[in-house]
Image (spheres, coloured by chain):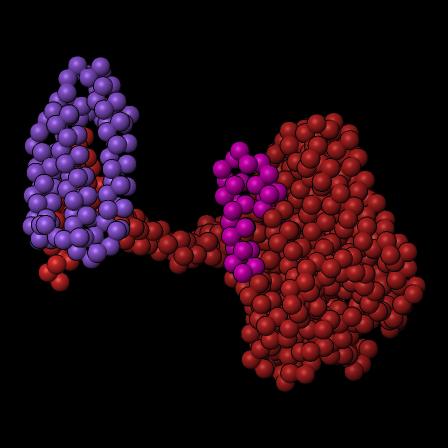
Amino acid sequence: MTAMVPTAVGLAIAAVLFCTGLVGVLVRRNIIIILLSIEMMFNACGLAFVFAGSYWLQPDGQVMYFFILTVAAAEVSVGLSLVLQMYRQFGSLDVNTVNRMRG
Amino acid sequence: MLSLLWLVPALPMAGFLILALGGRRLPHRAVSAVAVGSTGLSAAIAILVSATHLRLAPGGGTYSQTLWQWMRVGDFAPSVTLSLDALSLTMMVVVTVVGFLIHVYSIAFMAADEGYGRFFAYMNLFVASMLMLVLADNLLLLYVGWEGVGLCSYLLIGFWYKDRDNVRAALKAFWVTRAGDTAFAIGIFLLFTSLGTLRIQTILEDIAGYPAGAPLCNAAAALLLAGAVAKSAQLPLHVWLPDAMAGPTPVSALIHAATMVTAGVYLIGRMHALFLKAPTVLFVVAIIGAATLLLAAFSAMTQHDLKRILAYSTISQIGYMFLALGVGAWAAALSHFVTHAFFKSALFLGAGVVIQALGGEHDIFRMGGLRRRLPMTFQAFTLAALTLAAVPPLTLTFNSKDLILNQVWLSGRGGIVLWTLGMAGAFLTALYTFRMVFVVFLGPEPMKPVGKPSLWMLVPFAVLSGLGAVIGAPELLNALSGVTGFYHYLNSAMSGPAREFGLRETEWVFQAVYVAVSLIGIALAYYLYELAPALVRSMTATRVGSRLHRMLFVGWGFDWLYRRLIGVPYVRLARLNRGDVVDLLYVAVARISRGVNILLSRTVNGNVRWYVAGVAAGAVIVLGLAVLL
């Protein structure tokens, strides 16, 4: 197995992806975009794992990615149903409209 | 027969439990039956047990009965054991007999009171505690009884609790005796840590190995003395007894004249071997006794309140007992205790009859001429008063006090000075006693008594007065013919230094002097309060006279002194520390927590992105630190 991409470049891509996702979570107000950004951060982490695994020639990195994939799938299913509920309740997808905490 | 001993304290205790649990629901008749029945039965058993004990061991001896093991912690294993010897036997019989008669008296005296059941419940508890105190075999059990009688005293002084003054008097009695109780408890701890036992007999045997004046003996004796002084209302802790007269009259008669206040005398008598090893403390006992008997007798001279006169008289008479203890004349102190228990409770019961007949009047100067209206009360009261003033041959009990004075004269250190003080006290005793008798029963009649006193009250009163008058007869035999009776029996439990006059004639001379002094006192009282009352008035009207009168009237200003020395500084200190210095630390902790809470709760604004930013910033900082360090 030959390394097509150097590890440093791969990790840098992962970092850029993660930061993009983080900024998306912080600045966007649309809940669907926020979920997308979270998904991006998950995948950035997965990419970092895979690159780290290939650097040490261990399969653990790829195994870890499967876990992340599973968690991400579960998160999306719960997250989307919450989005649906939120739209029904508030008629909007803007997170700033749901910042009131009532018991 | 002896094995019935446990019933003596158990019966009044059972009476207390029945009355305490069901006193409200029981009718008056049932309450009286339970209360009087239990004490009466207890008195009968006490007499029966005593007779058996005397028959089996005529020269004295100790019978002890272990009821159960109280607790066991390592070597510390006190048991609930009753022990009967000459000393406790005497106390037991007096407590049960006087207690029974006063219970009978109370049936009529308290008949109209709404707290009828409560009153008898407390009285029964008192009798049970007092019996526990005198029969206890170890100091711990004795202390239980000691505290029990203190509690009952408090409850009964404040019996009419709706009046604020009564509550105040009750609290005063409780606090003052509590001061002494604390010292007594420390004394018990000291004895236990040094000797490893609380059994009185063992302590007395162990202490015999110590040299006289050993630090342990001095300290323990002094601490026990402090307890005795507070309980027996001796100088300087006597201030509670005159105020304790706020309680119902039968209470004053039973607790504050006959029994509880002599617990201190009993304690010193019980621990006499310890006191013999502490000669300095013993001498202090004598000085306290002499000072108390004189100061209290002076105060009794000026009181207007019939019960307060008797209260000061009680303090003074217990002073005689302390004087006797102080010179090591244990048996003399005890025989004075016995006669005093009878005649003083009789005087109180008589005072109760008079006060109730006059509708609650306490001031003797508003009374007078009661001789015609209450003839039987007059006779019984005068008989008891003659016993108190010790005048033969109208009363056979005249030499219990003389016995003490003889022993004081014969004792070594300071004997003559103490004897002189005692003689002055005897003179004053006759004077104040008959001032009371003459003012109340002779002369004009400013108030007419309402109704006739009930026979339930008159009979116990007369019986006590009569018993008081004849109880000293064995002593008289002893003095006349040298028959060894009661006095020597008491000596079997408490061997003291034997002191006798060399010549029988000398004893007769002393006896004559005592009688003469009493008679002069009575004559002077008659002159001052019957023949020339104007003279007294003009004497108290002068500047010096009125000042002296006021000073004696308030009992030498001890209350004032204590308020100045303890009350005022305490209140001032409390006011100074209103903010509570120690509390500041805890207040600061609370304030800081609250501030941080307010600060942090601002960050909980419900904005999810804000939280995410916080998490991200935190992660960056932690990672940055991890990389840099």
Look at 21% across and 56% down and name the residue there: A57
Residue B32 visible to the viewer: yes
Q: Quadrant of the C terminus of chain B?
A: bottom left
Q: Percent from the top left, x then y, of residue B273?
A: 69, 75
What residue lies at 11% left-to-right and 37% top-to-bottom?
A21
- Residue B304 image position (x, y, % from top left): 56, 45
| Quadrant including the N terminus of chain B | bottom right
The chain displayed purple equals: A
Name the residue at the right extreme. Answer: B55
State the residue at coordinates (22%, 41%). B597
Q: Residue furthest bottom?
A: B211
Give, as a single range, the part of the protein colored magenta: B153-182
Along the horizontal axis of the image, is A70 left or right of B236? left
- Per the image, is B72 magenta? no
The secondary structure making up most of the magenta span is helix
- Relative to B32, say whether A84 is above or below: above
Res. B379 image quadrant: top right
Name the residue: 81% across, 77% down.
B505
Residue furthest front as drawn: A1
Task: Please determine whether, in this image, residue A69 is positioned above or below residue B191.
Answer: above
Q: Position of residue B540 (x, y in %)?
A: 48, 51
